[in-house]
Image: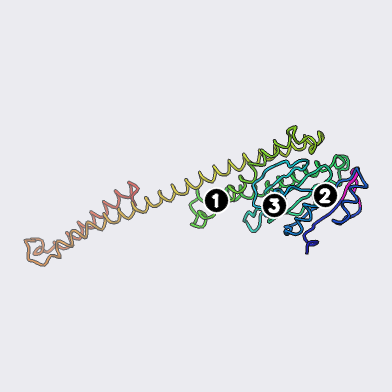
């Protein structure tokens, strides 16, 4: 059962890949090869497996507990010679943004990655690292950078998809062919952007924190420029998220304003038609009273046509005026 949660267990030395390991053979390898380090990849480990990993690498109990339970905000903490990094991952599924987590334990000779929820496999990261033996020879710090860069790069397609959807909504709003479902979509996009901001905004602080002298032993000098590049990408994503949030807020405000304007137009038209109907209603109600009044035109031969013609002419003139005024 535990073995199914172990995605990969690989060792590297001098930039080259060593034969596949098992958990039991890791201590012997690290003891025999002073130049080797281990990359252990886990996928939603249970409490038993996490306890084995904690004992194997001497991980701090608080960090191990965080990695097992997940639901952590992006952060970087140091426990002795072990660096603990928590990241939020994101993946686009059926138009919805699903979030997951990745927890990293980085020591002088090991890196343990623990994935939870929506997260792409780190096989491309492993391939990229193995394709650059010079930087891989610097140790687990390069793998840490590669994972950070991979996680940040996954945000760009999501932002592009959200941006395209927002542009389509704007076009429909201004054309007037939107429907109530579009308003619901706006709120869903806004919720996704809030989730992205919660994932990316702390990541900028994490990268800056990792570049301090306190982590010089974990992040070699050769890797620091690459880490600054990741920080720059995180800043760009953070700015793009803020811009899209403002655009969504403006689009929602415009849509509500357009809806109010259309309601006012409908109210004006109803009021105009009501005014037109008021004239014949008033005239016919007078002649419909149940008493004999002094209506000389009743005895006049042309009285009925004159009254009907007067009503028709008055209505036509009022209709023309209302049409010209924009009420109809």
Q: Residue 174, image x and y in percent?
A: 50, 48
Front of the two marks 2 and 3: 3
Query: Considering only order in the chain, which callout, 2 or 1, is on the residue closer to the N terminus?
Result: 2
Q: Position of residue 271 (x, y in %)?
A: 30, 53
Badge 2: residue crowd in 10 Å (few <14, some 14–19, many ≥20):
many
- Give the residue pinned by disc 1: 169
Q: Quadrant of the N terminus?
A: bottom right
Q: Identify the disc placed on residue 148.
A: none
Give the alpha-carbon distance from disc 2 to disc 3, as whole Å.
20 Å
The residues bearing labels 1 and 2 have C-alpha atoms spaced at a distance of: 45 Å
Q: Earlier in the sequence, mark 2 or mark 3?
A: 2
Around disc 3, counting alpha carbons within 10 Å, would you say few (fewer than 14), some (14 to 19), or many (20 or more)? some
- Residues packed near mark 1 inside 10 Å, few (<14), some (14 to 19) or many (20 plus): many
- Report, in whole angstroms, how far the alpha carbon at label 1 lies from the one at label 3: 43 Å
Q: What residue does disc 2 label?
A: 39
Give the residue pinned by disc 3.
Answer: 65
Residue at the right extreme of this rendering: 32
Q: Is residue 292 above or below residue 323?
A: below
Closest to the observer: 233 or 76? 76
Judging from the image, what secondary structure is the residue with disc 1 in? helix
x, y (%) of residue 220? 81, 36
Q: Counting residues from the N terminus, which is met first, the one under dot 1 or under dot 3?
A: 3
Residue range highlighted in magenta: 11-18
In the rendered image, the vertical position of residue 64 relative to residue 201, given as above or below: below
Please give the name of the residue rendered at 85% of the width and 39% of the height, measured from the top-left corner: 138
Rendered image quadrant of residue 306: bottom left
For this rendering, which residue is in front, 168 or 286?
A: 168
Q: Are marks 1 and 3 in contact (CB under 8 Å)?
A: no
């Amino acid at each position: 059962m535990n073995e199914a949660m172990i995605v990969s267990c690989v060792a590297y030395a001098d930039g080259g890949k060593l034969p596949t390991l098992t958990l039991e053979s890791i201590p012997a390898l690290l003891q025999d090869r002073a130049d080797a380090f281990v990359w252990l990849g886990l996928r939603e480990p249970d409490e038993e497996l996490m306890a084995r990993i904690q004992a194997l690498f001497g991980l701090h109990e608080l960090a191990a507990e965080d990695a097992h339970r997940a639901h952590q905000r992006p952060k970087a903490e140091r426990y002795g010679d072990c660096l603990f990094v928590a990241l939020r991952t994101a993946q686009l599924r059926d138009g919805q943004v699903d979030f997951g987590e990745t927890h990293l334990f980085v020591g002088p000779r090991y890196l343990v990655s623990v994935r939870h929820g929506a997260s792409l496999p780190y096989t491309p990261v492993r391939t990229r690292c193995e394709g650059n033996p010079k930087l891989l020879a610097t140790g687990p710090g390069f793998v840490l950078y590669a994972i950070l860069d991979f996680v940040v790069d996954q945000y760009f397609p999501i932002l592009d998809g959200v941006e395209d959807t927002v542009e389509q909504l704007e076009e429909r709003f201004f054309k007037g062919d939107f429907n109530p479902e579009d308003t619901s979509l706006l709120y869903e996009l806004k919720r996704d952007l809030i989730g992205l901001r919660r994932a990316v905004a702390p990541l900028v602080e994490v990268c800056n924190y990792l570049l301090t002298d306190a982590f010089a032993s974990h992040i070699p000098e050769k890797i620091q420029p690459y880490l600054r590049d990741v920080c720059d990408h995180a800043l760009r994503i953070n700015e793009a998220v803020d811009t899209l949030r403002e655009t969504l807020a403006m689009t929602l405000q415009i849509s509500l304003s357009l809806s109010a304007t259309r309601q006012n137009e409908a109210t004006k038209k109803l009021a105009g038609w009501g005014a037109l109907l008021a004239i014949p209603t008033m005239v016919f109600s007078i002649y419909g009273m149940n008493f004999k009044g002094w209506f000389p035109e009743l005895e006049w031969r042309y009285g009925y046509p004159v009254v009907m013609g007067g009503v028709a002419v008055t209505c036509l003139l009022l209709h023309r005026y209302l049409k010209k005024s924009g009420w109809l």
